[in-house]
Image: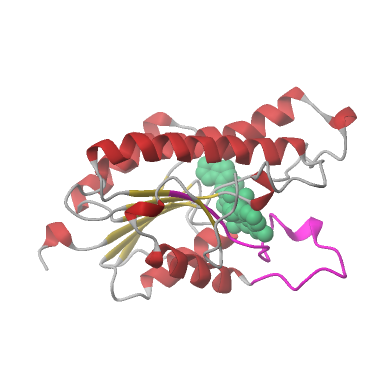
Amino acid sequence: MSAATRPITVVVGADGGIGRALADRLTNDPTYDRVVALSRRRPEGWDDDARRFWAPVDILDDVALAAAAAVVREIGAPTRIIVATGLLHAGGVTPEKNLRALDAATLTRLFTINAVGPALVAKHFLPLTPRDRSGLFAALSARVGSLADNRLGGWYGYRASKAALNMFIRGLAIEHARSRPLGICVALHPGTVDTALSAPFRSSGAKTPFTPAQAAGYLLAVMDRLTPADTGGFFAWDGATIPW
Ligand SMILES: NC(=O)c1ccc[n+]([C@@H]2O[C@H](COP(=O)([O-])OP(=O)(O)OC[C@H]3O[C@@H](n4cnc5c(N)ncnc54)[C@H](OP(=O)(O)O)[C@@H]3O)[C@@H](O)[C@H]2O)c1
């Protein structure tokens, strides 16, 4: 295999719970030649070597994204770009239980991180994917972003920002297919995963969450089965289609 066609994967959000598990699993997968990990901070215990390296990126920073994309372009065309960033809660951000809790700054922050950031990643990295082979762009969304699936209400900002992310995916899949008919752009739901993001919201009677390593394995298996006919879709960790 020539250097130009060796599979390269980019994981954005590689210091998050699921992102790190994806980066680790891909590093150990001999099918991948290089893994490029991008995050605001270097993942704990991460050492660059011949098969993997890390570069800093804030997904809201166009200049940083352009710089990271230039680094990846030097290596070759990535055949897989996975966006594993996201926000559900943080200091000052708590999922809303009702309309009274709506706050403009919180809603804006959720939309910016969950929808605008992945769209900017697509802007900078989708043009790097190959034209002559299949290339995948997958963003981690959430089932609660499905309009059809919303039967409980609440969590307005997180739900609506993931629905906005899903619409970005749908639109960019259509545009991307015009120049790369073999390309695949999808939104994925990882299931409930034991990470800092989900920790405060797991009730005692609920099902045991997946470990990040389990979720990474399931997600990569789904990605392996996707074809260009699936582009623009929304899929769960088990490969099932989720209605918009
Ligand atoms: N865990 C679950 O049960 C679950 C369920 C459904 C969907 N999801 C989705 O899966 C994805 C990953 O979730 P997770 O559980 O792995 O969460 P996590 O451990 O909190 O990871 C999220 C990552 O996003 C990064 N991030 C946030 N804003 C960023 C920015 N501006 N630039 C760069 N990175 C940024 C964070 O980096 P910093 O450390 O720099 O803040 C963090 O590493 C999210 O989209 C989430 O909505 C998760």
Residue 198: percent from left, percent from top: 72, 57
**Residue at (35, 75) in percent of width and height:** 29
Residue 164 location, quadrant: top right
203 or 65, which lies in front? Answer: 203
Q: Is residue 8 above or below residue 107?
A: below
Q: Is residue 6 above or below residue 25?
A: above
Q: Is residue 239 above or below residue 151?
A: below
Determine if the magenta segment contains residue 137.
no
Quick one: which residue is furthest to the left in this view? 2
SS majority, magenta: loop
Total of numbered circles in the picture?
0
Residue 205 shown left or right of residue 226 in the figure: right
Residue 101: percent from left, percent from top: 86, 31
Quarter of the image with the C terminus is top right
164 or 46, which lies in front? Answer: 164
Residue 74 shown left or right of residue 103 in the figure: left
The magenta stretch is: 186-210
**Residue at (34, 34) in percent of width and height:** 175
**Residue at (26, 55) in percent of width and height:** 134
Q: Is residue 228 above or below residue 91?
A: below
